[in-house]
Amino acid sequence: MVVLGAGPAGLVLGNLLQDSGIDCVLLERAERAHVQTRARAGFLAAHTVRILERHGLDEGLRRRGQAHSTCEFRTEDGRFRLDYSGLGRGERHTVYPQQHLVTDLLTRFLAVGGRVHFATEAVDVLDADTDRPSVTVREADGRPVRLRARYVAGCDGRHGAARRSLPAGSARRQHLDHGVTWLGLLAQAPPSLDAVGYAVHERGFAGHMARTSEITRYYLECERGTPADAWSDERIWDELELRMRATEYGPLHRGPVVERAVVGLESDVLEPLRHGSLFLVGDAAGLISPSAAKGANLAVLEAELLARALIAALHHGDTKGLDAYSARSLAHIWRAQEFSHWMIGLLHGPSGTDGPSLFHNSLRRSRLASLRTSRSRQDWFAEHYVGV
Ligand code: RFL
């Protein structure tokens, strides 16, 4: 079995296959140090934690993960909090930075005999419509090498080799640019509130998400085309405090901004997620905007689905799971896309003062008001916010 990519999807899949005695090699374009320090997600859904627990992959998150269950909305109509552990299915998030999870999964995979080729870029997946597919890789020294396997899992993200290798017309791509851009920031500063903070402001959205006691993630909606380094630290903090209404609700804990990235809110789903012996998993299958923190959670869920199906096929000759993998994963992906899209509409409004902009902003206000006041709306929100 060849797995492309050592992110959450590839590493969960690799661990599960290796544990069941299926020989598995992971090809990873980046160096090991880069993979283990790439800060991205932090909010793991209850379902994700259960999957990791089920397979003994939860040691680090049990020790260092923080339970989290409150979000706070700050709007032109005041602020309100939702404790979602008392709503919907009564579930919580576990805050555990993605780079820690990836480090745990990688360490475990290597400890049980898994093999990872770092600095090794997959270039092409060939013969995917046969039962002897192969992957062409470029080694660190530039040498091309071909690897053969019974199956190939493309866990190499949206711009990886798996997607690129699909023959024209074999998959339908559905793409939506939500027309919203965020500056994604990591600050070396403790969290400023004991909740996920969502601020809706006429100058644009601002978000606050805890990562650790020393690092906090913030988001600032910005004009499309803004370079990541366009704003000084001081301007970033001033703008965050303005949009998060610090004069009313208290100042933010400031600190150096140690990472900035421009994040365009986009969705991009392929259908089907299988082409013969090649399967797409995680961001390679469906990219989701980070508005509802679903990407890493979907990656783990799909990796478990595919691992089970591959184990049944390779150990027992039962290929029903492989046949169902695409439809089952897509059902989860589209539910997450629907909620994520709803969140984008809750948190952003057009900036204009023309009739349609005013109308959309009034709808957004009303959507927030119903979330503040309607118990059934809150239950629905909680179920989808923590669920995958
Ligand atoms: P990854 O993690 O991108 O891993 C893919 C791996 O493949 C490698 N690769 C290749 N290797 C070999 N050959 C090639 N040709 C290759 N091309 C690429 C890459 O180096 C990489 O190591 O994909 P995976 O495993 O599918 O996992 C997906 C998640 O990483 C992603 O969905 C989340 O980070 C999204 N996301 C969040 N998700 C959550 O569930 N909760 C969150 O709070 C959350 N916050 C975020 C996020 C994504 C963000 N960015 C990147 C926009 C916050 C941000 C800022």
Image: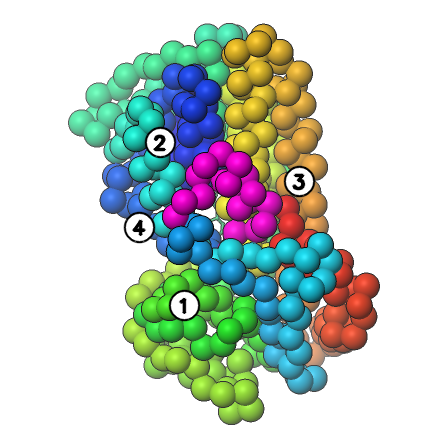
From this view, report whether residue 57 is shown above or below residue 371. above
Give the label, 4 or 2, closer to the camera. 2
User: Is the residue 312 above or below the residue 378 in the image?
Assistant: above
Distance CA(mark 4)–CA(mark 1): 15 Å
Q: Residue at position x 42%, y 13% from top?
A: 149
Residue 55 forms part of the magenta stretch? yes
Q: Residue at x 51, y 91 (%)?
A: 247
Quadrant of the displayed image that contains ligand 1: top left
The reply, left or right, for residue 370 in relation to residue 312 is right
Residue 265 figure quarter: bottom right
Which residue position holds label 2? 109
* Residue extending furthest toward the bottom: 247
- Judging by the rendered image, the residue that carries numbered circle 4 is 37
> In terms of image quadrants, where is residue 377?
bottom right
Residue picked out by circle 1: 216
Res 239 seen here: no
